[in-house]
Image (tube, rainbow, N blue to C red):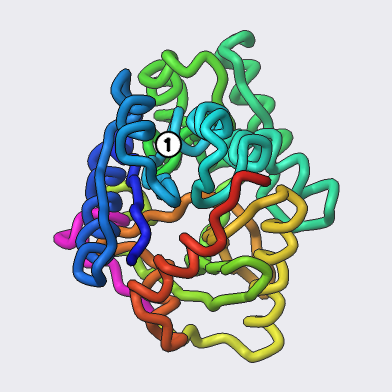
Amino acid sequence: MKKKILIISGGISKERLISLDTGQQVANELKKNGYRVKITEPDNNLEKNIKFFKPNVIFNALHGQFGEDGYIQTILERFKIPYTHSGVIASSIAMDKEISKKIFIKNKINTPKFFTYSYDVKNDDLIKKIKKKLRFPVVVKPLNEGSSVNVYICNEKNIIRILNSIKQYKKVMIEEFIGGREIQVAIMGNKKLGAIELKPRRKFYDYKAKYNSSAKTEHIIPIDLPKKKLNEVLSMSLKAHKVIGCKGVTRSDFKFKNGKFYLLEINTQPGMTKLSLVQEIAAFKGISFIKLIQWILRDASTKK
């Protein structure tokens, strides 16, 4: 008899719609292959649904805050039921861009220069600091959002206005802008699954470019890189996966410019929508969507 899989999706983050899509895509594929599947929100009924349905595995399809940051993982630990993707500590570290970048730097993984800003200095002083430490343009981003939510490329003229528009975060990252090529790498356990290049028609690979087919982002696989360079970025991704303590499948976002790779961030719960990248990389390697999901389910555990 096929296993019972409880999929948690939705939630209250700004990535709710992506999570719902991921959850539905996974559910459809599992149902087609004979699994008993239930989808639930991470709400007050979660505990009741877990106890009533008695799943063999919980598939965490949440994205963003409360789903990828160690919060839901802490709750799931109580039930002693295997759940997918990374555990409490790795999830919380990877979601915090400041902490994860400090770990990358400590482990000699190249990442763009940055500093954090807590709205605690005068505008003129901030401009001077950026010119001294980074130079314009720069990237402004929240410390703990995913899917490029509220990420902006800023110049000297618009940065103060943009910072004021996202003041609800209280603390943000101001990062060196790296042009060049967009490279995404998938890791599957301790295996270098593969890489894909993206050519967005928009200014950068933002939320719309990722999830809206009308944005017409071009996906290129295999990517045009010398074998040595390809292995370099795959190895950087695997190293990041390991030093953060990740489990299961991860996707790392890189920029490639002037022969150098820059790791932007690592994603512990990559999307599984029709436009998502991990299953596209897997398919290129001969791994079907259902085989990928089945591997993620087998990899699930209560010990992270």
Residue that protrudes farthest toward the left in the picture: 214
* Number of numbered tags placed on the structure image: 1
For residue 100, which quarter of the picture?
top right
Locate residue 29, reporting x and y percent.
25, 66
Label 1 CA crowd tier, 10 Å (few <14, some 14–19, many 20+): many
Magenta run includes residue 212 = yes
* Position of 36 relative to 98 (above/below): below
- Decide if residue 148 is on the left or right side of residue 213: right
Q: Is residue 20 magenta?
A: no
Residues shaded magenta: 209-220
Q: Position of residue 257 (x, y in %)?
A: 60, 68
Residue behind mark 1: 64
Q: Position of residue 69 (x, y in %)?
A: 54, 33
Q: Is residue 117 above or below residue 238?
A: above
Residue drawn at x 53%, y 47% is 82
Q: Nearer the viewer, residue 198 or 290?
A: 290
